[in-house]
Image (tube, rainbow, N blue to C red):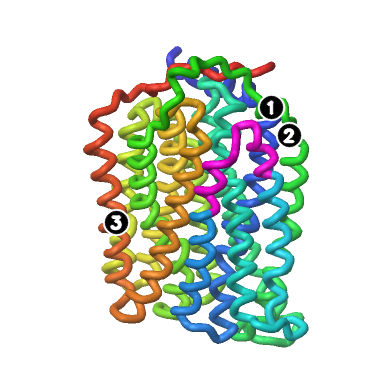
């Protein structure tokens, strides 16, 4: 009877998902396929085929992530809750423009090629920041506590599934274009054509977000202004620091996993794409398990499991120079990130007053960008000066520090959210 009741409750949660939340999931699928799928596999390989070294590649990645960090903070500070939909539409539009422009590098002899690459890639990160900063408050405002854990889990699952499909698609296309053009995979042209197609897959997500209603993001919030007048600066700083440290591990593999396999282990593009896709695929059940983990362990323990597990997943990359070990570490990182990140999103949003949730979302997103920018800048230096194992060990230490800070400081909080107001939604 208990199993049946749990199953019915889970299915009922699906039925409670509102139209605007459902459309936003389509946007996440579009972003996952293009950005976390095709670009995650192809972009760095494209730069390598253009003849650039590790230092320049790390600088390009870091510049985009630094723009992501700075713009996320600005967006979080100046956006209002009712602007979540507009921000996401604008973000998807900017991504569409950037994805159209970026592959034009060395096409018709565009001047200042290196600056062009860095500027347009940074533009795509600005678009990504607009989407990511607004998606958390958007979903918080368009869900109730009944289906919220499920929806956040679905975000991770959909990003992973679409990222898996995009990884495989992106990994196969260079070989196809190389055959059609009579070129080898050492040439940059097959990768350029692959990146050119990416813009097409942003369009469905943009249309879906346009289809959401302004009313869906305008909640009938009834709060006592006196209880929300003062910014909870201590909590915001704490959550931002934890986010910055815990995401370094993920940033290390997202930026350098494909470069590591290509340059250090001399593996093929198809194998890199397969492993990237497998990581995204494994993340799907892990993301869908988010509401179950939260129910069984509570939010705090779910986060601790995720953060320390992320650190452990980097150990094979640091100590075993084999593609099997690297793949195992990557699979672990993707699976653990898929439930730890949405769980932390729920944690910091439910532990802050409604007035400051978009600010917290912006600073948390800034922390991700800053974390990845630092790991990109530092990674290029550490790998060139020392080695990949030293680099991955650095990422492990940072991730563990984030877990320890959260573990120690969260002991002072009740596991229940400090914000008791519930958002009233029009049915």
Asked if residue 223 lies left or right of residue 237, the reply is right
Residue beneath label 3, please? 398
Q: Which residue is mark 2?
A: 212
Residue 86 falls within the magenta-colored stretch: yes
Can you see residue 4?
no
Q: Quadrant of residue 41?
A: bottom right
**Mark 1 highlights which residue?**
216
Q: Do labels 2 and 3 touch, CB within 8 Å?
A: no
Q: x%, y% of residue 119?
A: 61, 69
Secondary structure beneath dot 2 equals: loop
Relative to 111, 64 lies left or right: left
Give the mark, 2 or 3, whose residue is nearer the N terminus.
Answer: 2
Seen from the viewer's position, the closer of residues 282 and 393 is 393
Please state the extent of the stretch shown in magenta in the rendering: 71-88
Q: Mark 3: give few (<14), some (14-19) or many (20+) Cα within 10 Å.
A: many
Q: Position of residue 295 (x, y in %)?
A: 39, 25
Q: Residue at x 63, y 60 (%)?
A: 124
Count every numbered label the image shows and give the total.
Answer: 3
Earlier-in-chain disc, 1 versus 3: 1
Which sits in the foreground, 309 or 396?
396
Q: Is residue 44 visible?
A: yes
- Mark 1 residue element: helix
Image quadrant assignment for residue 12: top right
The magenta stretch spans residue 369: no
Using the image as rendered, state which of residue 137 and residue 158 is in the foreground: 137
Q: Is residue 102 left or right of residue 280?
A: right
Do the residues under discs 2 and 1 have CB atoms within 8 angstroms? Answer: yes
Residue at the spot 76% in from the left edge and 52% down from the top edge: 203
Left or right relative to 62: residue 408: left
């Amino acid at each position: 009877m208990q199993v049946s009741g749990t199953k019915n409750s889970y299915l009922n949660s699906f039925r409670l998902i509102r139209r605007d939340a459902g459309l936003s999931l389509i946007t996440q699928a579009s972003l996952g396929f293009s950005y976390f799928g095709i670009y995650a596999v192809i972009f760095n390989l494209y730069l390598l085929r253009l003849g650039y070294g590790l230092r320049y590649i790390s600088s390009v990645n870091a510049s985009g992530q630094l723009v992501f960090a700075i713009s996320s903070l600005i967006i979080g500070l100046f956006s209002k809750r009712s602007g979540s939909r507009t921000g996401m539409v604008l973000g998807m539009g900017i991504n569409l423009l950037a994805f159209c422009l970026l592959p034009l590098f060395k096409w018709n002899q565009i001047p200042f090629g290196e600056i062009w690459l860095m500027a347009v890639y940074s533009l795509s990160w600005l678009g990504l920041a607009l989407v990511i900063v607004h998606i958390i408050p958007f979903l918080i405002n368009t869900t109730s506590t009944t289906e919220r854990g499920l929806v956040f889990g679905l975000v991770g699952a959909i990003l992973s599934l679409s990222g898996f499909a995009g990884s495989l698609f992106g990994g196969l296309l260079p070989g196809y274009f190389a055959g059609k053009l009579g070129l080898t995979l050492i040439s940059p042209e097959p990768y350029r054509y692959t990146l050119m197609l990416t813009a097409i897959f942003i369009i469905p997500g943009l249309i879906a977000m346009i289809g959401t209603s302004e009313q869906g993001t305008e909640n009938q919030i009834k709060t006592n202004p006196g209880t929300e007048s003062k910014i909870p600066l201590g909590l915001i700083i704490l959550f931002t620091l934890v986010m910055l440290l815990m995401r370094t591990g993920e940033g290390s593999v997202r930026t350098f996993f494909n470069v590591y396999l290509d340059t250090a282990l001399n593996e093929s593009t198809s194998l890199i794409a397969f492993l990237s896709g497998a990581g995204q695929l494994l993340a799907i059940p892990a993301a869908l398990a988010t509401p179950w983990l939260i129910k069984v362990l509570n939010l705090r323990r779910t986060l601790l499991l995720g953060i320390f597990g992320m650190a452990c997943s980097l150990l094979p990359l640091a100590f075993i120079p084999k593609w099997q070990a690297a793949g195992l570490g990557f699979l672990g990182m993707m699976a653990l990130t898929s439930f730890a990140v949405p769980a932390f999103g729920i944690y910091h949003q439910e532990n802050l007053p409604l007035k400051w949730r978009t600010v917290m979302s912006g600073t948390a997103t800034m922390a991700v960008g800053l974390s990845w920018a630092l790991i990109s800048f530092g990674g290029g230096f550490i790998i060139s000066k020392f080695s990949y194992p030293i680099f991955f060990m650095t990422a492990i230490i940072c991730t563990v520090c984030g877990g320890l800070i959260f573990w120690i400081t969260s002991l002072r909080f009740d596991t229940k959210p400090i914000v008791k107001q519930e958002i009233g939604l029009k049915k």
